[in-house]
Image (cartoon, helix red, strand yellow):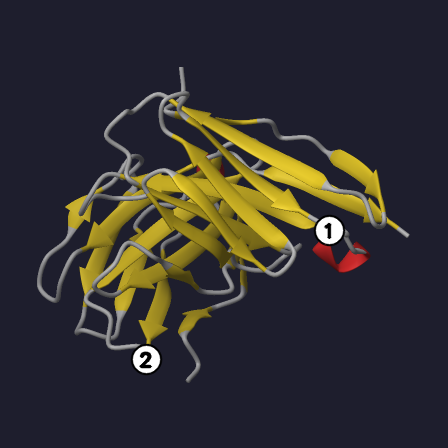
Amino acid sequence: QKEVEQDPGPLSVPEGAIVSLNCTYSNSAFQYFMWYRQYSRKGPELLMYTYSSGNKEDGRFTAQVDKSSKYISLFIRDSQPSDSATYLCAMSEVGNKLVFGAGTILRVKS
Amino acid sequence: NAGVTQTPKFQVLKTGQSMTLQCAQDMNHNSMYWYRQDPGMGLRLIYYSASEGTTDKGEVPNGYNVSRLNKREFSLRLESAAPSQTSVYFCASSGTGDTQYFGPGTRLTVL
């Protein structure tokens, strides 16, 4: 079993839809949780960063962490074709290396 | 600031050939990383360097060597390339926190 599980998709939604992307993990020591966005043939770029549990909002993006369920989510409101990309979750213990999910491919159709 | 830069962008090798992938960062970060990305596998850590002068193995180090040349530069060497090393290679760096910043990647094909 992988330490971080992420549905690879692809997830296809119409423009304007609310998108929910999720990861589950098994290591209860993870404290830092991140979401990276990766456009085709580009390097990953940091989208959201959360420490421990709770919600964080940045514009159309909301990151949620539920440590009791070992489950993290990224919500995208009013999705746009420019949001089409692969979304990678990543997490780490304090002072340790990042562990990445396999990534979910998102396609937003206009 | 250029951030993290990688050269070359593309490379085709024959089995048994050697090559070095170069990475440089201009953010004064202490830590640098090399990952490979394969379909369905996500990013897997090959080697990392927590500070200048130190290197450590990651999840998939076999067939690779690294050199932390100075604080800015971290190179990855394939001594005898194999088709299983066909992948996209990313270099990343991080400062005092856990956030990593990635380069644009090198697409390597080994025939």
Q: Using the image, determine if residue A22 lies above or below residue A1.
A: below
Residue B93 drawn at (x, y percent): 31, 63
Most extreme residue toward the left is B53
Residue visible at 41% across and 20% down in the picture: A69
Image quarter of residue B33: bottom left
Residue B12 in view: no
Above or below: residue A18 compared with residue B107: above
Looking at the picture, how far across and down is residue A94, in whole percent? 19, 43
Q: The disc numbered 1 marks a residue on which chain? A: A
| Occupied quadrant, residue A7 | top right
Q: Nearer the viewer, mark 2 or mark 1?
A: 1
Residue A55 vs A101, above or below: the answer is: below
Q: Is residue B109 above or below residue B6?
A: above
Residue at point 74% right, 34% down?
A: A11
Mark 1 residue crowding within 10 angstroms, few (<14) / some (14–19) / many (20+): many
Q: Nearer the viewer, residue A68 or B68?
A: A68
Q: Secondary structure at mark 1?
A: loop
Image quadrant where one finds the N terminus of chain A:
top left
Marks 2 and 1 sit apart, C-alpha to C-alpha, by: 29 Å
The label number, if any, that marks residue A84 in the structure image = 1
Number of numbered discs overlaid on the protein picture: 2
Residue type at mark 2 is Asp
Can marks 2 and 1 be said to lie on one chain?
Answer: no
Q: Amino acid at mark 1?
A: Ser
> The numbered mark 2 sits on a residue in which chain?
B
Residue A107 visible in rendering? yes
In the image, taking residue B74 as reference, residue A50 lies left or right, namely right
Q: Residue at x 19, y 67 (%)?
A: B30
Residue labelled with disc 2: B26
Quick one: SS at disc 2? Answer: loop
